[in-house]
Image (tube, grey):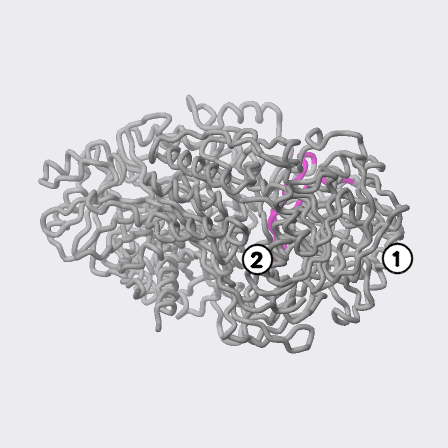
Amino acid sequence: MSAPRLELVRGRALLGLKGPRAQAWLAALGVAVPQVPNTWRAGANSWSIVRLGAAEFFLDTDAADEALATLRAQLRAGPPGVYPVPREDWELRLAGARADEMLAEIAAIDFAALDTDAKPIIMTLMAGIAVVVAPYETAGERTYRIWCDPTFGPALNEILGTLVRAYDECAAP
Amino acid sequence: MYRLDGRRGEWIDRSAILRFTFEGREYRGYAGDTISSALAAAGVAYLGRSFKYHRPRGIASFANHDSNAFFQVDGVPNVRGDVTPLAAGMTITAVNTFGGLARDKARILDRFGRLLPVGFYYKAFHTKALFPFWERMFRKLTGLGEVDLRAPRGETAKRFGFCDVLVIGAGASGLAAALAAARAGAKVTLADEWPRLGGGAVLGADGDAAAASVDAVLAQARITVLTRTVAVGYYADHWVALAEAARLTKMRARAVVFATGAIEQPAVFRNNDLPGVMQASGALRLANCYGVAPGRRVVIVAANLEAYAACIALLARGIAVAAVIDLRAGGEVEALSGQCARQGVQIVHAHAPYEAIRGPDGAVCALSFAPFDLSGRLDLSAVRRIDCDAVLSSVGWASASQLLSQAGGRLEFRDEIQAFVPARLPPGVFAAGRANGVYEFAARCDDGRNAGAAAAAHAGCGSARREPPAPPERRPSHPFPIIDHPSGKNFVDFDEDLQVEDLVNAAQEGFDSSELMKRYSTVGMGPSQGKHSNMHALRVLARARGMRVDDLGLTTARPMYHPVPLKLLAGRNFHVERRTPLDTLHAAHGAVWMSAGAWRRPEYYAVAGEGRAESIAREVETVRNRVGVIDLGTLGKIEVHGPQAAEFLDRAYAGTYSNLRAGTSRYALMLDESGVIVDDGVIARLGSERFYFTTTTSGSAIVFRELSRLNSLWGFDCGLVNLTGHRAAFNIAGPSSREVLGALTDLDLGESGFPHLGARVGTVGGHEAIVLRSGFVGELAFEVHLPATCAGAAWRAAHEAGKSHGLRPFGVEAQRALRLEKGHFIIGQDTDGLTDPFEADAGWAVNMEKPFFVGQRSLKILRARGPRQLLVGIEVDACGEMPKESHLIIDGGGIAGRVTSIAHSRTLGKIIGLAMVAPPLATPGRMLSIRLTGGGLAAARVVPKPFYDPPNLRQTGRCP
């Protein structure tokens, strides 16, 4: 079995917000959030809308997305009960048949047992680094989107890269 | 010992020959051999030397339940030869020898055994002048194996594992448990320390049934099998550490079945440690799995059915068994003993071994034995001798219950089987088979099936209930297979070279509980952790005290169950380091890095031709006279929004922030409930319902968590946002800082437009930023906070704008020196876990008149009581040695304080510092004595703070 594939994702933008009226504010602007805490949904314009717990959200899309820029400007106006959460996260994507096995080395979550149809969001530690993880499947292959604080980004990228190389060496004939 | 002809099912591949060396001589073995089995096949009787007496030792348990077979292999110490596979080209030596195994210089210690009784080291080394001599000697003599610092570093993996039911042990009961749990729908992991499943059952009369179970397990998709895997520790909530040769699995199960079996116990008689004397189960495994005969003429010391089964099995392999010496008067059932007798084996009842006799080659050459009565006495008038080259003992078992104890199981001693078995187990913990006191094959299978089904039910699969096992049909263990001898050398603990008299003496000296005896005698403290010795030690102690074994109880079992190489615990050794958003830009300036907690920060910036001290001094001088810039990306950065944001901060911090005007900032002190300083920072008000504030580098996560907790408790209408990693920050400090920043922003930076402690939102370098007019170094300074991805451009722009002003970056060490000149304290360095604001000379940052803030009640008490110590400024006489941080202040012959910060200030031309001193010494002008490392004293004087620019003109812009 081949080694997992790792990609450092660039060119994405995140818009984070939280607060008692955050969900209502987004709904009023036509952005429907997941109903269940700690899940995500695919929105319009190729957005991923992530719900962290009860009242915190972030939207992920291409950095050039003008609709997100518009939303960001409206958030800056300070709607009551809606608090901006500036996010400069690094995003890493890990894909492949052995991705679960690799993640088992650094996270105490049984990723293999997750039902991706439910679009879960996992907040956990990987090698001691706080991460937000969104697993999904495409054509039967599992991919993990992994977001982390940018000051931990280089460390997490190095750790995952080290593991991918180790798995690559094991897979070499 | 010698190699037998091949047989079906053996674990070696005779077509693959492996060459290796042992003690400088070349040998051959087969793929599949362990180191011990390969040496045994080659007729090598001696494997090592014992710990204390350096007696020659050979195979004993052949199960890693003793430390006889420890080797140094290719630079790796303490390799366990009984279980480590042989590899081609191995270079193997014995451990614990001086001059090699055969000519070990320390073997003379065996003759001085009488001078080295139990606990002798507590009584012998009282002459202090000789301590260095004894220390050198013991450092040389003690320890097993040598750490080779040239050995290549081997990284191993660690991983988390998850299952519904973890079954530990793949003998008859473990296989049954795993199958039952899997058939109930559970996801099962089955772990066993051996390379193949089935345990001892596959080697015996029930081998076919056991083999069928093995096949069923391997075919069951819900069972993951891990062989050569030892469960080394049980931790809370069914978390079990599983150790393989190159991987550690941290297995989280919903239920655990301990089918860990039982450990065969040696018979104890004089010279029971000679090469050639071993446990019968080990000999059987040697013969059937590795094709090695334990000897050419074997005698078996027996007290159970297993002894006769072993006899029959050895005879079937063509190995001559001269006699079975049975401790029991009734012997064994006729079906088994008769079968042995008909093949020429002499069966002797009610006799016990008296002494293993050493041959000219040092191994056993004969066994003397004598009549043995019910009270355990030997009739020495009737001692007989039988020639042999191997003595196998099969006198009993001890449940492998250590992991069960770690899991919180309560054990009780059962007379009928002479073993400790579970009396009560916590929810989700199950025992099966011999670990549960069940010895017959069919009963073990039933017990395992029931345990596995019950475990699956506990994990949510099925609904079976745990039933008690069938009552035992026989006694598998002799109650006291321990024979005394006037000349001793009847070993109870092979690892620690402990004889029967050592334990009796320990009891007589008052160390007469199992825990005390263990610590005084070290029984059970060797590498095998009492696997072959704890039960016998209890028996000896019980007899010495006239008590029952169950009245004494076992010692506490703790992880690790087996020795675990540290590399398994270290794993891949990931080192997580946080880096600020400006990290990649510092190298171009010559940054020399340091670790600051979890962060990587520039300690200083090196310049060619300059040493460290010079570079730091130059950075300080640059800030004082021109302009410097420091990366402050490590600071905690938090925002609080909402209608009750101000009220929240008033309660969480010691100062008042509800009266801050938008566009201003204030120093903030955070206290805990006992009034102790835990963090500080600057709180800026950016709007009526928006505050932005900083924390210390090390405090950011803790402060955010605490503030979140407080907000959950108080339920205020406000929200907290942690921006620490998502914001970069840098501080431009020095007389020219206004000009440098002015080139990057359109904010009004003038004194009236942006006064000291102001806070503005604007653009810097084209990017939205928060600018605070504050700093830590006592100069005009502006702190810029902006999004992480924009920071690099702004930093580069600042350097470009600063060129004409002589701008240089400065690092952590320069900042520490600069802040010391201003008398600013660093939390955790100049304060400790008990320092309140009054002691730290920071009472001005506390508003006691607020209705409430965290720590207020305690401060009222502390203020009334008065300080125990005070933080003061000191100047030190420049002549002589400079004191260091933590050097003590001495007054009246006693300790009166300590130095907390100290440095030579080139700005001021003197040595300055901060110190915590007893209040009577805190008066300016008071002289202090500081004790230096060598014992001398340095003179210091208490002076007012700050040392530099006392009226604070430079930072507040009032400097003419």
Vertical position of residue B805 compared to residue B947: above or below: below
Taken as a whole, is the magenta stretch helix, strand or loop? Answer: strand
Residue identifier under label 1: B112
Residue B811: x %, y % from top left:
47, 60
Residue identifier under label 2: B565
Q: Which residues are magenta?
A: B894-920
Which marked residue is nearer to the observer: mark 1 or mark 2? 1
Q: What amino acid type should be assigned to the residue bearing mark 2?
A: Pro
Residue shown at the point (16%, 39%) measured from the top left: A33
Identify the chain of the residue marked 1, using the numbered disc in the image: B
Q: What amino acid type should be assigned to the residue bearing mark 1?
A: Phe
Quadrant housing residue A64 = bottom left
Residue shown at the point (38%, 62%) measured from the top left: A163
Vertical position of residue B859 compared to residue B598: above or below: above
Mark 2 crowd level (few <14, some 14–19, many ≥20, 10 Å Cα): some
In the drawing, does residue B470 fall left or right of residue A159? right
Vertical position of residue B215 compared to residue B287: above or below: above
Q: How many numbered circles does the render carry? A: 2
Residue B705: x %, y % from top left:
40, 38
Mark 1 crowd level (few <14, some 14–19, many ≥20, 10 Å Cα): few
A30 or B512, nearer to the observer: B512
Q: Quadrant of the N terminus of chain A?
A: bottom left
Residue B260 in view in this figure: yes
Sequence-wise, the earlier of marks 1 and 2 is 1
